[in-house]
Amino acid sequence: MAVDPAQLRLVYYPDPALRRKTRLVDVEAGLVRAVAEKMLQIMREAPGVGLAAPQVGLDWRMFVANATGQPEDDKVFINPRLIEPGRDLADAEEGCLSLPDITATIRRPAEISIEANDLDGESFRLTDNGLAARVWQHEYDHLDGVLILDRMNTIDKLSNRKAIRDLEQRGRR
């Protein structure tokens, strides 16, 4: 598939791209850099703290994140792997740029490490026990076609029923 970074747009549920498993990124470095820059732009404008490649219609195993909102904290994660999840679980409210107006309390490991490659192909490893850890896990889910809809408890499913139905109806048009 030919990719034009300038044409990338945020896709919304129930777009099938959000349910596809991704493939390892093995494309020309200049293209990856251009896609990452466009994804960061889309994330900032939304505004959000993370954006995975499936959310712009790509089946790439890549996401961008910035838990602080400071430009110097923009980070690109290429072919990431989540490792060493902590034993303690934490509940927190999450939303998703591809699921506007939908939030849910999601339980995840409070602490986790991630290994990935950066835009220069260098591997790195980070560990966090705050918002960044949650963002990494949320975006990583996207790479496997998993949405917060799949992690919601029954109460959140019921309280978001109308918003989910509205998105599904808009997607059929």
Image (cartoon, rainbow, N blue to C red):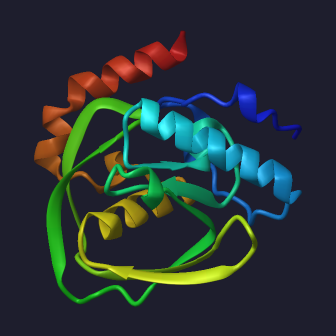
Residue 159 vs residue 99, the one in the foreground = 99
**Residue 50 position within the rendered picture, expressed as x and y whole percent measured from the top left:** 43, 50
Q: Quadrant of the C terminus?
A: top right
With respect to residue 55, does 124 lie above or below?
below
- Count of numbered labels shown in the rendering: 0
Q: Quadrant of the N terminus?
A: top right
Q: Residue furthest top?
A: 173
Q: Residue at x 33, y 70 (%)?
A: 133
Q: Is residue 16 left or right of residue 134?
A: right
Q: Is residue 37 left or right of residue 126?
A: right
Q: Residue at x 36, y 60 (%)?
A: 135
**Residue 89 position within the rendered picture, expressed as x and y whole percent measured from the top left:** 18, 77
* Residue 17 can be seen, yes or no: no
Q: Is residue 45 left or right of residue 77?
A: left
Residue 164, picture quadrant: top left
With respect to residue 114, does 172 lie above or below?
above
With respect to residue 72, does 5 lie above or below?
above
**Residue 125 position within the rendered picture, expressed as x and y whole percent measured from the top left:** 52, 84
Q: Residue at x 23, y 76 (%)?
A: 110
**Residue 15 position within the rendered picture, expressed as x and y whole percent measured from the top left:** 56, 31
With respect to residue 59, does 172 lie above or below?
above
Q: Residue at x 26, y 24 (%)?
A: 163
Residue 123 vs residue 160, the one in the foreground = 123
Residue 140 vs residue 115, the one in the foreground = 115
* Residue 166 can be seen, yes or no: yes
Residue 68, picture quadrant: bottom left
Q: Is residue 75 left or right of residue 91?
A: right
